[in-house]
Image (spheres, grey):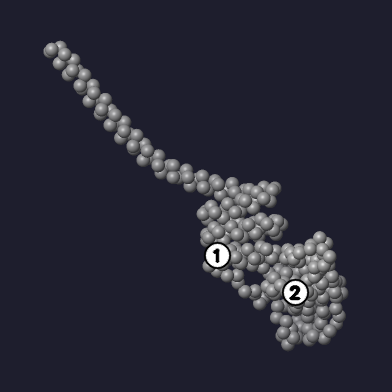
Amino acid sequence: MLRDRDSIDQVMPTRVTLTARTKRARRVLLAAVLCVAPIVASTGDVQAQGKTAFLAEQLRKNTDFRVRVDAALKLGTSDDAAAVKPLCGCLGDQSEVEAVRVACAAALGKLKKPGGDGCLKEHTGDKSSKVREQVTTSLKALGGAAPAASAAGPSCPAPPAGSKAKYFVGVGISNKTSRPDTDIKPIVEQQVVCKLQSMGRFKMTADTDPKKMAAAVSKEKLDGYFLNVSVEPIQYAGGNLKISMKLTIMTHTRDLKGEIGKSLSMPGVGSPSKSDEDDLIKMAAEKLVNDFAGLKP
């Protein structure tokens, strides 16, 4: 019996030792978990940043526009402020297809991060009516509105360095289509005003009041002209879209000097299409301004 007790006494310390070791192991494991937790959270942030960078890369470089559209929309739901820059860059890329730029405008409205509203406001006069519509919708989603058209006219590149103006020109636009002025006038202004200004010999003015133009013409000793561009009613017939425009040339005091007309057709357009209408309006406006510029070397 004594030998048995001795055996039991020898075993019991071993059990206690194992229990203590187990407790120590648990404490070590818990400490390790607590140390790792912040690292896991940080890794999640890195993964989020990596996802945004990947999507931005797809938006910028993928050759399939459908993939670029998907990338833009996913950036819009990323909740990452870093997505604003690539989306804004896409929206301002006039070589990008319309569908992708519309998706970028929509994504900025969904993202709701600082800088998105400012970017959208910079593109309220986009050449694409679909992009403009989405920009307006996104601005409303952000609690803002598209700014009113500036009295200073469209934003155009500066005239060539060293160029000397010979003509002082104001432009008016008559919209006879069923579409609102906010659709038609910015397109025509951009084509006519910016095209003439880029030639260097035309000094453009947004203030077309005859008296003010006369004062400026007298002061600067330039030939003054007022151009009125009329966009006629848009026609759809026989599966074709037809755009007709007229440029009336007057002196700055409104004496009639002549008229130039242009009509362009696009086959295979049987139902109203704003994007096709916009394209034809741009083409007709460019032809009109080139004809006028040819008369004023």
The local secondary structure at tag 1 comes to helix
Q: Position of residue 20 (x, y in %)?
A: 25, 29
Q: Quadrant of residue 29?
A: top left
User: Closest to the observer: 153 or 72?
Assistant: 72
The local secondary structure at tag 2 comes to loop
Q: Position of residue 89 (x, y in %)?
A: 63, 57
Whether residue 222 is visible, yes or no, is no
Q: Residues within 10 Å of mark 2 (few under 14, many from 20)?
A: some
Quadrant placement of the N terminus: top left
Q: Residue at x 30, y 35 (%)?
A: 27
User: Closest to the observer: 66 or 86?
Assistant: 66
Q: Quadrant of residue 98?
A: bottom right
Quadrant placement of the C terminus: bottom right
Q: Residues within 10 Å of mark 1 (few under 14, many from 20)?
A: some
Residue at mark 2: 177
User: Closest to the observer: 271 or 210?
Assistant: 271
Residue at mark 1: 141
Image position of 26 with respect to 135: above or below: above
